[in-house]
Amino acid sequence: MNKCSNAQHPHCTYWVMPGAQTCEGGHAQPDASSYDLLTAMRSSRAAPPATVLEAVPARPEANVAAAPADTNYARPLHRAQARPQLHISGFDPRAAGGRQTLKMELRGMPEACAPQLALQLQSDLIPNGAARQQFVRAVSGEWRPVFVEFSSRGKEHGQYQISIELLSQHPGMAARKWVCTFVILVPRLDASLTEIHRIFLSTHKNVRVMADDASIARVSAQGGDSLDIDVTARNAGIAHLDLNAPAGKVDLGFSTIAWDEDLIEIDMPLAAAMHPHPSQAASLVNAAPEAGAQRQIRLFAMAECTIGRFELVDPEADLLLTHYSADGQDTNGLTRRLSGRHAVIRRSGLGFEIEDVSRYGILLDGVWPGKHKPTALRLGMRIEFSASIKGIVTLCVSAILPHGVILHRVDHGVSAECFYLLAPETHPGYPVRSYPAAPHAAALPLLFHRDGGFWHLDQLSGKETALAPTTSLEKLSRVPRHTRFASEPYPEHWIIRTGADDLYSTVAANALSTA
């Protein structure tokens, strides 16, 4: 509510109804008031997006043959882009001290974003102070809502801030990031319903009328606009409210506890985020392994990992195997009965598979699967190298992660090494869903590969730590003491790779330049 702002009548004390062109005294009001601007902005948000034509650039003839056949190059119709907003609903401040669920929906997101958006939340209300979820877009273009649960049990009453980051990262698309922050009210446990409504719900009124110290406030509403009005009269004040309602029933009630938060896009660097120590293969070295622990945890991140014979010069495989006897490692002898490229492990659908590509064969749980016949890996499967000679190398699938597999040796090299085979540029998600794992594999740290390097993920707090030779590993969960990060999967050997198109070309080039 504003007073008359006509320049020719500076002493007029009549009130002006929001949106009215004249005051109660008939004095014209200047155009383009703040209320008009606000109303126009709200109506533009509420209006359904119109269908407009989009100018589509001509398809380059040079790319016609290289483009997929199902690529849509012409989209003549699309919906006008609205301002990105996060619609939050389901909050009830009356449920003080209990579990609550917030429903979050995306509205007005641009089409030029990833089909999956990473949602990161930080607040003292959320368990462990942080949470990570994902918005997934349906085929129709709508976004599936996300539900966030929290409990105010044991929390001090007052206002709690919830910070949100929305990240769009997809191959071939520019990385984009949106942020917003809103406040949740946690009332006292003994607060009455009237107090909660007075404190929280009254803030949702867009018109407030107050009459203090024997003053008179008058409101006249015309038209079908929706108004949430809070009327208060104190100290012998008189408030007159005329809604000009037609004859019939008038519905009165409290407003729904749901609101929209504007998503503010934050500028991101044009180049993709880089890991402080990019690598596709590395290892964790334990200087003093305890009973049952491995001295070397070898890490590999590639779409297809080749397993083969250990060679000091130009090995053909990525994961190199040697025979272990009761006397220790033997790089010759039975090791020579392994093929240079013996088997391949790759991702297949939601799991992983192994394929025999060797001369000597492999045994899966004692059975030869056949050459060039991929077989799905399962928990506890024994992989024997090779099929013709027993006891060279025996591995066991000890864990099947959402983004990789863990292999342990079950021969004389059981305390020497184990292997992480991870999908590159893949996050397991947080919270991490349960995965099948043997007890000795479940005790290992949760690692993943992203931004070109390896990361450690704390399953309780969701904290991510980039792994590099300078990273301190002492406080990371499930990492044994006396452990360091090595930038090579076999730091105990001087492996020379003269090729420039293999996994370790960068490491080999650096080694040769310093030799």
Image: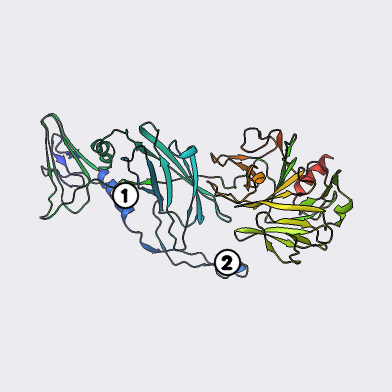
| Count of marks placed on residues | 2
Q: Secondary structure at mark 2?
A: loop
Q: Are marks 2 and 1 in contact (CB under 8 Å)?
A: no
- Which residue corresponds to the image point at 75% horizontal and 40% vertical from the top-left? 295
Amino acid type indicated by mark 1: Met
Q: Nearer the viewer, residue 171 or 369?
A: 369
Tag 2: amino acid: Pro
Image side of residue 106 versus residue 284, left or right: left
To which quarter of the image does residue 163 belong? top left
Residue 142: percent from left, percent from top: 43, 59
Question: Could you say where residue 424 lies in the image, as x and y percent from the top left?
Answer: 64, 52
Separation (CA) of disc 2 from disc 1: 40 Å
Label 2 sits on residue: 60
Asked which secondary structure carries label 1, the reply is: helix
Percent across and percent down for residue 169 are: 54, 51
Mark 2 or mark 1: which is in front? Answer: 1
Q: Is residue 305 visible?
A: no
> In the shown orientation, is residue 166 left or right of residue 26?
right
Q: Which of the image's four quarters has the C terminus?
A: top right
Going by the image, does 429 lie left or right of 6? right
Residue 197 coordinates in the image, percent (x, y): 25, 39
Which quadrant of the structure image shows residue 455?
A: top right
Q: Quadrant of the N terminus?
A: top left
User: Which residue is the site of mark 1?
Assistant: 41
Number of other residues with Cα within 10 Å of mark 2, as a class: few under 14, some 14 to 19, many 20 or more: few
Task: Please name the residue shown 24% across and 37% down the image.
Answer: 198
Dot 2 or dot 1, earlier in sequence: 1
Q: Does residue 248 appear in the picture of this structure?
A: yes
* Of residues 232 and 364, the one drawn nearer to the viewer in this rendering: 364
Is 441 above or below relative to 142? above
Q: Residues within 10 Å of mark 1 (few under 14, many from 20)?
A: few
